[in-house]
Amino acid sequence: MRQQRLLNPTLRDVPGDAEAASHRLMLRAGLIRQLSSGIYSYLPLGLKALQHIQTIVREEMDRAGAQEMLMPALHPAELWKASGRWDVYGPELMRLEDRNGREFALGATHEEVITTLIKDEIHSYKKLPVTLYQIQTKYRDERRPRFGLLRGREFLMKDAYSFDRSTSGLDASYQAMFDAYVNIFTRCGLQFRAVEADSGAIGGTDTHEFMALADVGEDTIVHCPSCQYAANLEKATGVITNEGTSSTGLPQAQPTKIHTPGVTSIKQLSQFLTIEPQQIIKSVAIKAEGAPVIVLIRGDLEINEIKLKQVLGVAEITMLSEAEIQALGSIAGFIGPVGLSSVKLLADTSIQGLNNAVVGANEADYHLQHVDVQRDLGELTYVDVRNVGQGESCIHCGNELAFARGIEVGHVFKLGTKYSESLGATFSDENGVSEPMIMGCYGIGVSRVLAAVIEQHQDERGIIWPNAIAPYSIHLLTVQVKDEAQMTLSEEIYQTLTSAGYSVLWDDREERPGVKFNDADLLGFPLRLTVGKKTSERIIECKERRQGEVYELNVEQLLTHCQ
Ligand code: ATP
Ligand code: MG
Ligand code: MG
Ligand code: MG
């Protein structure tokens, strides 16, 4: 491809609200453009990288025995009502009506559609097991779309679904997907951990998340640097707040006591929290047994109200305005400084149920903590998740556990019969007895992977693509396009490399050399070949983007290598 004609609008500056490195770089390198909040167009280079990820996903899914198909994005509401999720999924589900007033949803996930399809098409044990997958656009009206492709409202997902006749069959299907995920993320060049996760609202019993390690990640994971053990802190803390020992082996944390002065206003709270008042933009009042509890939610975080109700065991949650909170003069204190945990509980009295509140939403950065309120002192006891397990040792190998931030790039669940039962996907066994199929579901955020790769592979000059994902593997750069000899040599190299199967972007633009070199670093293809001063000697300059190493190469050497 000749860069002269490529739609690749690079930028020097990006909007200030692009906080994540991957978001900034994707805008600067002209890979994506925003159409609306959380909705993006992929420009040619962005699409190429995305397609490379899709190819890896397809190869590994196929290798694991999964079959590709494609399902609609437009789902009749009846399906979601039949599974019960029409009401449970909440405002994240994009809903619409057709011209006849019939309700639809834009697919946020496809358990309902695939289960209904399989129910109609498979009736006998002889056709099981089967695993199907698709790579398709998903819609989720995220409360806070952000970080570019990391949290979009329209995004590309690979979702797979397995159907088995026995739990041991499901175990095997799950393991095959788990192994495929390890291969996929490894091939994408990601540093990641497979962590034990909470099954949240999906209702499974066994589940792992694949977390790409990155500071911008919205999840906190605890992992053992010496062995395989890793867990999402949601799960780890959930275990800790239960009585006794835990299956994940984290010991019970010692609650920290904080003496809190009487806090009666947002302003005081913000002083106490040492944050700006405007950062406290959301709060929730929960009326339980007559006493209000204020749950403060950091302004940039989501809250899943249904989950909050479940966890707290209350029926009503009322959102309060800042003025209303200020009017609630009875607040005795709050718990904890703002940290990794996102939900802070404020209480003026002891509330049954809250004492046993456990962590658990499967929402990013959404954790509830064990709270023990001492009414008379205005003193609260809490578990600060940042201290949980710090200095604690792993039950598997005894080594000290570490913490990291992670981006959830993949998620595998053992669903069991939740959907097959509600939607009637049954098969008859050898004896003609009808049984519900046993299901698993497996997601990868394909577009999120793209952003996660950039998050992990970049420097101050730009992107540093892993070979497998790079839009082009070679960037051929002609310093002076007006110099005929340089153009002729460039053309020769371009033709030879492309015929040998290399993907080459040829910078034949009439730009200043400085601009071209800067763009080449920004675009970050693995190898840059520069045709310049030493053209008459048929010598070009090579630069490996990752190592930064620059060396000269005789063109004959290069061409022989390609033949
Ligand atoms: P998150 O916790 O980040 O909201 P999730 O648990 O809701 O993600 P799943 O339902 O497990 O997501 O979907 C499967 C995969 O789809 C996730 O592991 C993630 O990689 C990807 N994904 C989910 N939501 C988004 C989004 N808004 N934008 C991009 N990718 C997403
Ligand atoms: Mg999640
Ligand atoms: Mg989500
Ligand atoms: Mg998930």
Image (cartoon, grey):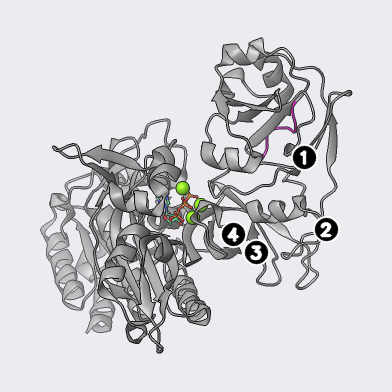
Quarter of the figure with residue 271: top right
Give the mark, 4 or 1, whose residue is nearer the N terminus: 4
Report if the CB atoms under discs 4 and 1 are less than 8 Å apart.
no
- What span is colored magenta in the figure? 334-340
Q: Residues within 10 Å of mark 1 (few under 14, many from 20)?
A: some
The picture places residue 114, in percent across and down from the top left corner, at 31, 64
Identify the secondary structure beneath mark 1: helix
Q: Residue at x 83, y 58 (%)?
A: 244
Within 10 Å of disc 4 (Cα), the crowding (few <14, some 14-19, many 20+) is many
Going by the numbered disc 1, the residue's amino acid type is Asn
Residue identifier under label 3: 230
Asked if the beta carbon under badge 4 is closer than 8 A to the nearest atom of ligand 4, the reply is: yes
Q: Determine which residue is flagged by label 2.
A: 244
C-alpha distance separating marks 4 and 1 = 23 Å
Badge number at residue 355: 1
Residue 53 against residue 29 in the figure, above or below: below
**12 or 369: which is nearer to us?**
369
> Circle 3 sits in a helix, a strand or a loop, which is it?
strand
Residue 197's disc is: 4
- Name the residue at 23% across, 70% down: 537
How far is the residue under mark 1 from the one under mark 3? 27 Å
Q: Most prominent secondary structure in the magenta stretch?
A: loop
Circles 1 and 3: CB atoms closer than 8 Å: no
The reply to whether dot 4 and dot 2 touch (C-beta < 8 Å) is no
Q: Which picture quadrant has residue 427?
A: bottom left
Q: Visible in this render: residue 471?
A: no
Amino acid type for the residue under numbered disc 3: Ala
Q: Are marks 1 and 2 in contact (CB under 8 Å)?
A: no
Q: Residue 86 magenta-drawn?
A: no
Q: Residue at x 28, y 41 (%)?
A: 33
Label 3: how many residues lie within 10 Å, few (<14), some (14-19) or many (20+)? many
